[in-house]
Image (tube, coloured by chain):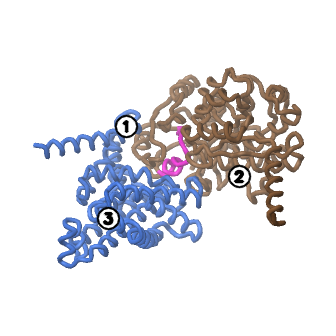
Chain colours: A blue, B brown
């Protein structure tokens, strides 16, 4: 029973970071209707920011998260203003090529600046644990999960309880209609893309503590975030939450209960995606 | 033609002449990708050797030119990089090499182009198989079975002195981690250990919680993991957080993350190396001095001195042979004994190839202790006794 509960908890804690990365991606897909292949690289920039601030100034990653959020919001807004804005009406393939190009550029810039080495952030609370009901919970993971939870609650409150959120949803539903009633669509897109990038930046800071910073670290998360938003239904923000939990739990349980499950955990999740897509398509076809 | 033009033309002529008369050696190393930490150490070692060789008069009285290509730790990139060096740069002598998979990928082209391979990397017996009849393959790095003997020796010592009997194995599911894993399990069992867990994981996923939780259901004395540097911190973090009661964690990655030793989670983790900067031999001390003078610091990566001696010994052999004739160079290499930072080097048959350099007597088990790598086994080179159980 302890093993079952520990596995459940491990999966649940892992889902926080997945949800954080995927929500940003879902925001850009849902509101701006742009598939941002560079989302994982924004995360990588966040991870390097955290590593840099820690190495140069000894800054705690919790504090770096604030810096990364602000810096990546600005970075995202700049990226939108200088590149994305100009391809919004272009064919989807052009948009994908653009974001793909940004991703490759950022990865190679990181390689040029920092080399391909794995870099780690050393904090005093790494490896510490709190014990609840006899279960050992990693402090870093718990903090990452709680931070992700706070940010996600904030994001949902913003989307569903604020004027800006209402505007975002209006633009997402009908861009032309929103323009007609006087909404500044580009301003809203800029803010949405900035928030999406900031979420990736904060996720990057968490990744630098939980894993490492390296030019390729974003790739794994881009793949998982795409899987999650596909599973949730493109642009469906609430769906992202349960899809993240499902991904993390399926990974944890397959790894624990199937011998050599580490090899199969991703395959199982992608099988789930196939099943969901086929089920949705067949339901739509009827 | 203005005097300026003439000057440029003259400089161009000199440049062309010097490149035409220089002796070229190629190096294929991973400057990026999974093995980049070791690859960059290799590059530093090679450049230091190049400086020293050229200061001492070069090769066959001409300057030595080193052409370095990045294999990106990727077999698909290694083959075109290798082919470019032998066809475009017309290189006939190669040094370097690190990963087994990248080396395996170029064994075909190497034989096809009859390239002289003074090879510092690759531990997989698959490479040994592929190169068994090739007359120009001089392999410096020990094969995996030599490495494993060294690891097993340390574990047997722990069994005798510390009553460590139960081993949990975590291995990455790519070719690096999973090749021969069943043989490893069998060898541990044969040596009287209980293998209580054998689990695969995805390198770089960082998701070790389920694996470690599973290990917690057993009594684990030795946690043996085969993976990459990217796995080191997440694994140690998970082991500590879960409260897994383990005697020692023994890792076998090709390299460790930058500044891993400074992380408190590294304390007590053990691993294998062929060299530490503290080795007392004169050759090693000279290398450390020269390395510090050139780079301002010293590395812990054994691939730096290995690459250094790799290029130095090849240049020495060519000079002794007095020509670039591969048969003559091979004959000299086969007969020579070289004094290197890693100890005496001579080439003798291994299980399958004719010219094997180091055979595992150089392997040293070290433990990360107080931000340093401290040799703890074999006892004749140990600086401290092993910390068991680790903190």
Contact, mark 3 vs mark 2 (Cβ under 8 Å): no
The structure residue drawn at horizontal position 59% and vertical position 26%, both measured from the top left corner, is: B126
Q: Quadrant of the N terminus of chain B?
A: bottom right
* Disc 1: which residue: A264
* Disc 3: which residue: A88
| A235 left or right, relative to B141 | left
**Residue A68, position in %: x, y?**
45, 69
- Bin the neighbour count of mark 2 within 10 Å (Cα to Cα): few under 14, some 14-19, many 20 and up: some
Which numbered disc, 1 or 3, marks the residue that appears first in the sequence? 3
| A50 left or right, relative to B355 | left
Element carrying mark 3? loop
**Residue A139, position in %: x, y?**
42, 59
The structure residue drawn at horizontal position 67% and vertical position 44%, both measured from the top left corner, is: B366
**Tag of residue B299:** 2
Foreground of the two, B63 or A237? B63
Foreground of the two, B175 or B118? B118
């Amino acid at each position: 029973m302890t093993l079952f509960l520990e596995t459940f908890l491990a999966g649940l804690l892992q889902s926080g970071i997945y949800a954080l990365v995927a929500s940003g991606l879902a925001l850009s897909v849902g509101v701006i209707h742009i598939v941002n292949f560079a989302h994982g690289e924004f995360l990588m920039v966040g991870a390097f920011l955290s590593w840099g601030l820690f190495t140069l100034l000894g800054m705690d990653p919790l504090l770096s998260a604030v810096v990364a959020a602000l810096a990546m919001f600005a970075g995202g807004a700049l990226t939108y203003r200088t590149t994305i804005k100009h391809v919004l009406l272009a064919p989807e393939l052009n948009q994908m090529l653009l974001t793909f190009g940004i991703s490759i550029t950022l990865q190679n810039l990181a390689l040029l600046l920092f080399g391909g080495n794995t870099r780690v952030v050393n904090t005093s609370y790494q490896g510490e644990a709190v014990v609840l009901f006899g279960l050992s919970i990693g402090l870093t993971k718990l903090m990452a999960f709680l931070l992700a939870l706070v940010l996600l609650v904030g994001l949902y409150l913003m989307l569903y309880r604020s004027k800006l959120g209402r505007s975002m949803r209006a633009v997402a539903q009908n861009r032309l209609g929103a323009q007609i009633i006087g909404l500044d669509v580009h301003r809203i897109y800029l803010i949405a893309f900035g928030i999406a990038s900031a979420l990736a930046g904060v996720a990057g800071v968490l990744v630098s503590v939980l894993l490492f910073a390296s030019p390729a670290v974003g790739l794994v998360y881009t793949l998982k975030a795409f899987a999650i938003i596909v599973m949730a239904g493109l642009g469906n923000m609430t769906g992202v939450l349960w899809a993240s939990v499902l991904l993390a739990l399926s990974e944890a349980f397959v790894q624990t209960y199937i011998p050599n499950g580490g090899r199969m955990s991703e395959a199982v999740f992608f099988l789930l995606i196939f099943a969901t897509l086929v089920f949705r398509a067949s339901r739509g076809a009827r | 033609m203005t005097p300026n033009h003439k000057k440029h033309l003259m400089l161009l002529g000199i440049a062309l002449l010097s490149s035409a008369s220089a002796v070229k050696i190629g190096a294929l190393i991973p400057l990026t990708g999974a093995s980049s930490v070791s690859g960059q150490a290799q590059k530093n070692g090679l450049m230091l050797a190049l400086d020293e060789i050229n200061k001492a008069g070069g090769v066959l009285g001409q300057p030595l030119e080193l052409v370095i290509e990045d294999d990106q730790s990727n077999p698909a990139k290694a083959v075109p990089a290798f082919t470019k060096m032998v066809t475009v740069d017309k290189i006939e002598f190669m040094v370097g090499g690190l990963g087994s998979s990248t080396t395996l990928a170029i064994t075909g082209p190497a034989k096809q182009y009859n390239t002289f391979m003074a090879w510092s990397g690759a531990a997989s017996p698959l490479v040994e198989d592929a190169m068994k009849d090739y007359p120009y393959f001089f392999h410096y790095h020990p094969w995996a079975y030599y490495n494993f003997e060294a690891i097993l020796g340390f574990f047997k010592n722990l069994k005798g002195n510390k009553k460590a009997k139960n081993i949990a194995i975590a291995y990455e599911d790519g070719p690096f981690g999973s090749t021969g894993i069943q043989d490893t399990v069998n060898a541990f069992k044969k040596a009287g250990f209980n293998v209580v867990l054998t689990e695969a994981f995805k390198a770089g996923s960082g998701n070790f919680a389920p694996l470690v939780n599973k290990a917690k259901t057993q009594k684990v004395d030795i946690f043996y993991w085969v993976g990459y540097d990217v796995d080191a911190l997440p694994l140690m973090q998970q082991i500590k957080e879960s409260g897994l009661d383990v005697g020692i964690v023994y890792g076998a990655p090709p390299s460790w993350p930058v500044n891993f030793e400074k992380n408190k989670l590294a304390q007590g983790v053990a691993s294998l190396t062929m060299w530490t900067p503290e080795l007392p031999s004169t050759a090693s001390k000279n290398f450390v001095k020269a390395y510090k003078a050139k780079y301002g610091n010293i590395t812990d990566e054994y691939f730096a001195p290995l690459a250094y001696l790799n290029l130095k010994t090849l240049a020495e052999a060519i000079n002794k042979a007095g020509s670039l004739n591969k048969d003559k160079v091979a004959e000299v290499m086969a007969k020579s004994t070289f004094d290197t930072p890693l100890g005496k080097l001579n080439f003798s048959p291994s299980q399958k190839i004719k010219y094997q350099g180091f055979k595992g007597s150089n392997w040293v088990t070290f433990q990360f202790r107080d931000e340093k790598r401290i040799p703890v086994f074999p006892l004749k080179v140990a600086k401290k006794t092993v910390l068991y159980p680790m903190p």
